[in-house]
Amino acid sequence: AIDISRLRGATGLITLDDGYANTGSCRSAITFIDGERGILRYRGVPIEDLAARSSFIETAELLIFGQLPDDEERAEFRSLLTENSWLHRDMRKHFDAFPKNAHPMSILSAMISALQSHDLPEHHFTDAMGFREAAANLIAKTRTIAAASYKSHIGQPIVYPRYDLPYAENFLHMMFTQPYRDYETTPEVAHALNMFLVLHADHEQNCSTSTVRMVASGGANMYASVSAGVNALWGPLHGGANMAVIEMLEQIRDGSLSAQQYIDRVKDKKSGAKLMGFGHRVYRNFDPRATILKSAADSMLDSMHITDPLLDIAREVEQAALADDYFASRRLYPNVDFYSGIILRAIGIPMDMFTVMFAIGRTPGWIAQWKEVTDNPGQRIYRPRQVYVGEPQREWKAREDR
Ligand code: ACO
């Protein structure tokens, strides 16, 4: 006799939920979001506290290992990061093979995938210490690859990481040190970058994280799964939105449009334009990350004595949108990407690196989610169903009869 309970999903009804708007794909203990109330917590810790008080690496340890680290754990993880920040000499050859105009996201995903071949053997992940090192390796290397891809894009020599600099400062060093010109960051810039990374570190089952979990559910290794996540992040409706927001603000500036004129264009659905950096599947209220980034952008530009006309345009667009019934009735508010580009511009990050910056920030979240899937003894392979809408059955015809 067939035991129906063993045929979960193989018989019976299929629920169709376009875009998985109401379908939970897993149980997770990593990140909590209450979209109605605008709450975000990593492992139970409010995002506001982490953004104000924690370093990106401490946040990464919280996400991946479940606890804020004590002094000993911090020191041990830091030395793992330092030891793992160099690229294998052969990895550097890959950079030369990319065309000069290659998008940094394509380089990043390819290089993370290649890390599996150059770096740690897969059996290394299985014990706890091996996993700690693999996690540190991927977090450290993602940053080194990102900076190196920028350097090779602009035709400058790759800058080596320094053992004495914290994570964010080390990235800025590798990005902006030039031949015969050292780069010194300021506390404001380092703080802003650190906060940007903390705010991007995880966000439960978004498009890229679900991709990582999907790939992991088939048993793929951490590098392969995270590389898939980088590709999923690339699109303008997801991580690519931080670039698209700046392009939109530039379009408003260059076309001498008023904020209201742009809003009217967006409301005319035939235009195909969207208000980039607005709207979210889960937040039907303010995205708490956007609130933090907005006030950070204000104070950062103030303290650095920078005036960015795009920030003024962004404020006008936000006000016009919030006062407009189109956005209010659909509960569309600014998301994390609306102000993050302004901060990245102020730091000096070129626009085609914006989505790579998001990927550096999201790497700890992807690692934590990969580990949660991999550690689950009852994990089933992700395998959604479909409702078939094609031809029921057709006759095969010989080529001369087609
Ligand atoms: N501008 C104009 N209209 C919008 C926007 C927007 N940014 N976002 C949603 N809408 C409209 C939709 O057209 C739809 O209108 P309708 O009811 O008349 O058909 C309604 O609001 C509901 O939107 P959905 O498309 O159902 O929202 P969904 O949850 O599927 O998409 C998404 C969410 C992709 C974030 C969407 O709001 C969007 O495209 N925003 C702009 C891109 C962006 O900022 N992405 C970053 C998201 S955050 C992140 O990934 C890091």
Image (cartoon, rainbow, N blue to C red):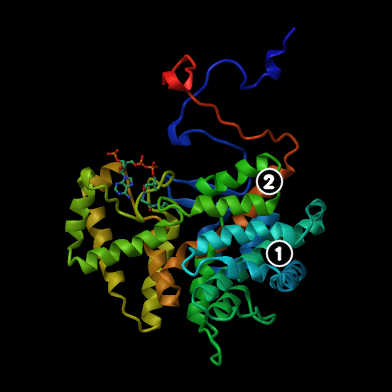
Placement of 327 over or under 24, stated as above or below: below
Where is residue 268? Give x, y as percent.
20, 46
In space, the residues marked 2 and 1 are separated at their CA atoms by 18 Å
The type of residue carrying mark 1 is: Asn
Work out which quarter of the rendered image holds the N terminus and state it. Answer: top right
The answer to whether the residue bearing label 2 lies less than 8 angstroms from the nearest atom of ligand 1 is no
* Residue in view at x 17 percent, y 63 percent: 258
* Type of amino acid under label 2: Glu
Quadrant of the image for the C terminus? Answer: top left
Name the element at disc 1. Answer: helix
Of mark 2 and mark 1, the one earlier in the sequence is 1
Q: Residue at x 65, y 71 (%)?
A: 92
Q: Which mark is residue 372?
A: 2
Q: In the displayed structure, would residue 320 be above or below residue 285?
A: below
Classify residue 27 by image quadrant.
top right
Residues under numbered marks 2 and 1 in contact, where contact means CB atoms less than 8 Å apart = no
Q: Nearer the viewer, residue 362 or 203?
A: 362
Residue extending farthest bottom: 180
In the image, residue 223 lies at what x, y percent? Answer: 67, 54
Q: Residues within 10 Å of mark 1 (few under 14, many from 20)?
A: many
Task: Identify the residue position indicated by label 1 in the image.
Answer: 137
Q: Callout 2: helix, strand or loop?
A: helix
